[in-house]
Image: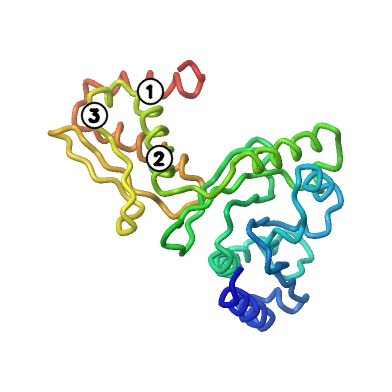
Amino acid sequence: MDNKTIRLLYLLDSQIEQCVDCPLYQHGRIKPYWTDTASYVLIGDVESNILLWEIMNKQGFAKEQFLIIQELNCKTTNNLELPYMNVCKKWVDLYINAVSPLRGMRFGRYLNENGSIEIRRINNFNMPIIPIVKSITPKFASYSKEGTQLLEQAVVKFKLMGGNMSIETYIKNNQIIIDLWKDRFDCLFDWNIKFIYDDEHWSHTKYNLKDQWAVIFPCDIDDAESWIIHEIIKLAFIICDSDPSKKLGLIKDLVAIVKKEY
């Protein structure tokens, strides 16, 4: 980590300690943890969790290698204060942008998504995309042997991801998702659908019904696959609105997806 980055992190530390953007500062603030060797990020209340660091150490990681920041960087008294995470998101983004981590983990209520990967944009021109592994919280994992195994699986997934994700890999991965979901709709069989990242167009899809092509641009949400699925299904509905004879086929395709018959 260079001196410029270290100075920026100290500046952020000073600024976050003065934040009054929501009422939670009255309970006391929680300063993010980092060192000058931080090259990964952990998002969640995990700094002092014994189980997590036992697993991390077993996989060859030390706490000093991580930026650790919570979704909510003030002390809370109950879950009713969780909506303030949207206010605090700017601090999470600022710290991650400063460190430009190679990859990271995000802890939350991800029992059914444990080990899945989300994509996060950062302001690094050369590597603007970092992969984040979703994991159940270490606290929840500690309640059972099965929970501990899920946490271990997520950490191993984090370890095996290797370095940060290039733009080329990001585009390739999302094109694979498009091709996978496109093939599940008969009305899209003859369509040419591409994923394009140009750092200019966001959160929409261009299409031409006559020539049967579409371009899906990235969306600023954490789960890229959910965005792509949303746009694929929307495009299928648009096609069927223009050609009612295809509506029955669309219904059958959607039922097959729900029943996982594909």
User: Which amino acid, by three-letter code, is at mark 3?
Assistant: Trp
Name the residue at 69% across, 45% down: 109
**Quadrant into which the C terminus falls:** top left
Q: Is residue 224 positioned above or below 2 on the image? A: above
Q: Quadrant of residue 12?
A: bottom right
Residue 175, position as x, y percentages in the image? 37, 36
Residue at image mark 1: 184
Q: Residues within 10 Å of mark 2 (few under 14, many from 20)?
A: many
**Quadrant into which the N terminus falls:** bottom right
Q: Residues within 10 Å of mark 1 (few under 14, many from 20)?
A: some
Q: CA distance from mark 3 to mark 1?
A: 12 Å
Identify the disc placed on residue 228. Answer: 2
User: Which amino acid, by three-letter code, is at mark 1?
Assistant: Arg
Q: Mark 1 or 2 closer to N-term?
A: 1
Identify the disc placed on residue 191. Answer: 3
User: Which amino acid, by three-letter code, is at mark 2?
Assistant: Ile
Q: Mark 3 or 1 closer to N-term?
A: 1
Q: Nearer the viewer, residue 141 or 252?
A: 141
Looking at the image, do the residues carrying marks 3 and 1 touch, with CB atoms under 8 Å apart?
A: no
Q: Quadrant of residue 154?
A: top right
Colouring of the image? rainbow
